[in-house]
Amino acid sequence: MQVDAVLARFFTLSKNRAAAFGPQYVQLWETLEQNTTGGKRFRPKMVLCAYQALGGTDLEAAAYIGAAFELLHTALIVHDDVIDHDFMRRGVPNISGSYRDAATAAGTTERVAEHSGISAAVIAGDLALFNSYRLIDRSGVADVTRARLLEVMDDALFASAAGELIDVDFQIALEVPRVDDILTMERLKTAVYSFECPLQAGAILAGASEQVVGTLGEFGREIGIAYQLVDDLLGVFGVEAETGKTTIGDLREGKRTVLIAYATSTPEWADVQCLIGNPDLTEEEAARVRELLVSCGAKSFAEGLARYYANRALARLAEPHIPVALRAELHPVADAVLGRVK
């Protein structure tokens, strides 16, 4: 994938530049690179999907825009792990964890080691965030288009920061938020930068009309919400070997999801509430929570809501100004989201 080549060049240049500042700085860039590689490149795929379906042919420029959104994704998850005080991601140490473990091996105290890890992650996330914008600057596209793309990138970051703050506030709220409030948070925190803006960026780069750009944003909003609903379902009911994500972490955290919000309105809530949010939740207790979320209807409700938003997304593609080629490219995206709900 050309996006991988763009990112590889970017990190090679950055590491060469960092060498003048010492081996520790090179190591930070190497760690950041490791945390950027191996992903599904989902956001770049959204950029390229819209771009090529709308007749775009400059794949080098599109690869730079796709890489910019991938680097933005890296920055946001690095900082999200800092906020959540997480030192692991998908079963392996993240940037915080890598630097914490190195400090521990050097003989520091646990407190100092964790501070070292978190500090390194903040710095690395800052570098990824800033350079996501720089990759758009280096794409070689015309000034007017580049300015528009930078606006879209700014929209993505601005919304994500708002969503992250809402999520932080949820964790200290005395009451579980309403379903609508959780959907708003998930749309802002993830759907905007993962679906809405990458699709719009691809359309803008292809020279599409504002009508098409706007409709793609609407499609991205709806399918992005559906995707997050499914992601929350998989975080509790998924198969770890398939998703690479623990199915007990969200329950131990007491994560505010639509599943939990719905459960609060049911008789089973008293039993659910006394179990979730316990960092020492056992596998047997987690299995009991899952049973309760099924019996109270929370699982079925979340699945139905995911289908509802995916179908709303498909309805956007029926607009007459959406080209057949674009419709054909995006239908499988919605189908894939729905396919995750079993």
Image (cartoon, rainbow, N blue to C red):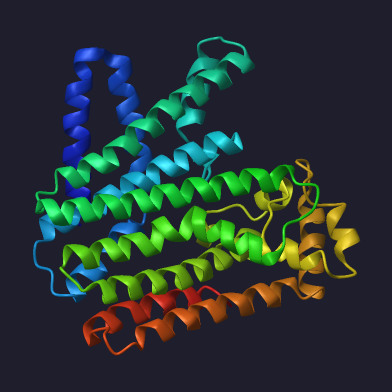
User: Which residue lies at the image location 46% right of the left edge and 52% below the top edge?
Assistant: 159
Q: Position of residue 136 (x, y in %)?
A: 20, 47
Report the quarter where the C terminus lies: bottom right
Report the quarter where the N terminus lies: bottom left
- Relative vertical location of residue 117 with respect to residue 294 in this rendering, above or below: above
Q: Could one spot residue 142 in this view of the protein?
A: yes
- Relative vertical location of residue 292 with respect to residue 8 in this rendering, above or below: below
Q: Position of residue 234 (x, y in %)?
A: 59, 63
Left or right: residue 236 versus residue 161 is: right
- Relative vertical location of residue 260 with respect to residue 267 in this rendering, above or below: above
Q: Position of residue 80 (x, y in %)?
A: 52, 41
Residue 86 figure quarter:
top right
Residue 221 figure quarter:
bottom left
Q: Position of residue 236 (x, y in %)?
A: 66, 60
Left or right: residue 215 versus residue 110 is: left
Q: Could one spot residue 2 in this view of the protein?
A: no
User: Which residue lies at the image location 50% right of the left edge and 11% below the top edge?
Assistant: 106
- Relative vertical location of residue 120 with respect to residue 171 in this rendering, above or below: above
Count of picture labels: 0
Left or right: residue 277 versus residue 118 is: right
User: Which residue lies at the image location 19% right of the left edge and 72% below the top edge?
Assistant: 208
User: Which residue lies at the image location 42% right of the left edge and 77% below the top edge?
Assistant: 334
As drawn, which residue projects farthest toward the top? 107
